[in-house]
Amino acid sequence: MMPWALALLIAVVAVALVLRARRRERALRAPFPPEWRALLAARVPLWRRLPTAERERVEYTARRFLRRVAFVGCGGLELTDEMRLIVAAQAAMLAAHRDPGAYDGLYAVLIYPDEFVVEERDEDEYGLVTEGRRALSGQTVDVARILLSWADIEAGLAGDDGYNVVLHEFAHHLDHTLDGALTDGGAVAPGAARWHDVLQAEYDALCDAVDRDEDTLIDPYGTEDLAEFFATATEVFFERATAFRAAHPRLHAELCRFYGVDPADWVDGGP
Ligand SMILES: [Zn+2]
């Protein structure tokens, strides 16, 4: 090929790629179709509370999620667009401010009809191995896969009760994408020392409260370890925002900084 022809070909391809990228970006930024918004308003209590500007960010992040992440129905579950949308919209609420591309590395969301059973093998510090089976409502396997139970996703839509398996598992995902730095003492951002101090102090306080058999706003499952604490606290931070801000002001402030939003300011802030 003549040099000028090669240069022309490269220029044409480059222009085509730029145009395609712009088209994609325009499509991602387009508002949700009214039927998607109606569906989310009917099914997802958190969606109803989103301020308009926040909703636009969440829609962009959710569209990006739907474009990139594969959904797989497992155990005979027939997936619907409604299921995909409900998962993507809630996952997007965690990432819309932090990083709309936070889920770009996620390969697939696998959804089972109900709780699913996983084989587990644990080895303690003395080399003692325990093997068993456990029924789970959700599991973040690694940075590439998240497993969810549809029955539990639906239970999470029942109201603002602080239980939401989608928020829980995607909070784990964000932690995993940072190599666990959020919950293992690693550097997450400026202010990391304060973040870890607050997380540890609040975790210890939850453990003490559970030991004393007190009722707690954060699910006692959060006492498992700091990673579970972060995920369970995230559920309450979004779903029971006003109560969370009142009961855990320091942790609330840290999560506001991390997620870039204060759900207690959304409409009525929830219960
Ligand atoms: Zn968990």
Image: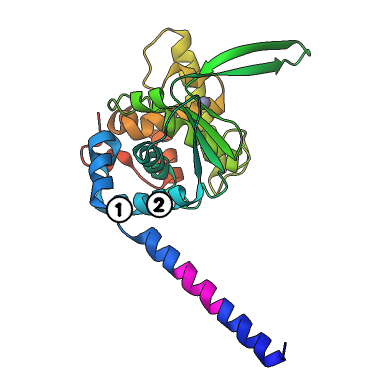
Could you say which is closer to the camera, residue 120 or residue 95?
120
CA distance separating discs 2 and 1:
8 Å
For marks 2 and 1 on the same chain, the one whose residue lies earlier in the sequence: 1
**Is the magenta region chiefly helix, strand or loop?**
helix
Name the residue at 23% across, 36% down.
Answer: 42
Quadrant location, the C terminus: top left
CB under 8 Å between callouts 2 and 1?
A: yes
Q: Position of residue 187 (x, y in %)?
A: 61, 44
Position above or below: 194 against 57: above
Label 1 is placed on what type of residue?
Phe
The magenta segment is 14-22
Q: Using the rendered image of the protein, determine whether residue 266 is visible from the camera's viewpoint.
A: no
Disc 1 target residue: 32
Q: Is residue 134 above or below residue 196?
A: above
At mark 1, the secondary structure is loop
Residue 175 position in % (x across, y down): 55, 38
Residue 111 marker? none
Q: Which residue is mark 2?
A: 63
Secondary structure under the numbered disc 2 in the rendered image: helix
| The residue at label 1 has a CB less than 8 Å from ligand 1 | no
Residue 214 visible? The answer is yes
Position of 95 relative to 12 (above/below) = above
The residue positioned 63% from the left and 17% from the top of the image is: 119
Q: Amino acid at mark 2?
A: Arg
Colouring style: rainbow
Packing grade of label 1 (10 A; few <14, some 14-19, many >=20) is some
The x, y position of residue 22, in whole percent, is: 44, 69
Q: Residue furthest right?
A: 127
Q: Nearer the viewer, residue 1 or 4?
A: 1
